[in-house]
Image (cartoon, rainbow, N blue to C red):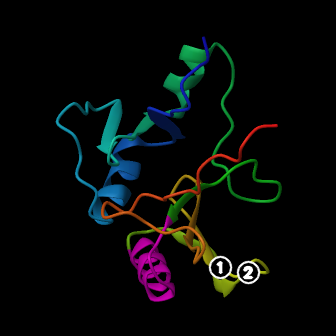
Amino acid sequence: MAVAPRISLITLAVADVAVATRFYQALGWPLSSASQPEASFFDLGGLVLSLYGRADLARDLGQEVASGASGPGAAMSLAQNQPSRSEVERVLAEAAAAGGAVIRPPHETHWGGYVGYVADPDGHVWEIAHNPFWPLDAEGRIVLPPPAPRG
């Protein structure tokens, strides 16, 4: 039996849960009533974003947890696609106003898209993108082409 291709929850290790929570609330993301002082939860349309203290996550894992993902050699980024270039610019501006740091302003890409990067207060990198080749559904979710035939 195969593992279902799904992500249920993304947890960001943060220095201060309250500070990180205020940043995401300032973006207009509603905080779930399931949140507690040590962990905040945001419903992202079927995917949950969790903010959890770095020390608590390290204790749970039984090993150290690196701080934020920004800086030289960032290992990953989160992404949010937008329906237009102007929406990319608007979202980046709102994230900066909420306390995020714009890492790279919006720009055209070599593949025909338009992207910019912003880091949250803990350095987690968000790519804000418009991809004209991937339409968005009514809820803003990417509609990928179907899988290629095997064989």
Q: Is residue 38 above or below residue 137?
A: above
* Quadrant of res 83: bottom left
Instruction: Tell me residue 79's x, y (percent).
Output: 56, 59
Who is closer to the viewer here, 122 or 4?
4
- Asked if the stretch drawn in magenta spans residue 27, the answer is no
Q: Residue at x 31, y 60 (%)?
A: 139
Quarter in which the N terminus is drawn: top right
Q: Mark 1 and mark 2 in contact? Answer it, CB < 8 Å.
A: yes
Instruction: Tell me residue 57's x, y (percent).
Output: 53, 24
Q: Is residue 106 above or below residue 16?
A: below
Who is closer to the viewer here, 1 or 148?
148
Q: Main secondary structure of the magenta part?
A: helix
Amino acid found under the numbered disc labelled 1? Gly
In the picture, measured across the screen, residue 32 lies left or right of residue 51, that is: left
Quarter in which the C terminus is drawn: top right
Secondary element type, mark 2: loop
In the picture, measured across the screen, residue 70 lies left or right of residue 119, that is: right
Amino acid found under the numbered disc labelled 2? Thr
Who is closer to the viewer here, 46 or 20?
46
Q: Is residue 64 above or below residue 69?
A: above
The residue indicated by pointer 2 is 109
* Quadrant of res 150: top right
Q: Tell me where the magenta segment starts and ends, as one range.
A: 81-97
**Crowding near the residue tagged with mark 1, few <14, some 14–19, many ≥20 C-alpha atoms within 10 Å:** some
Disc assigned to residue 113: 1
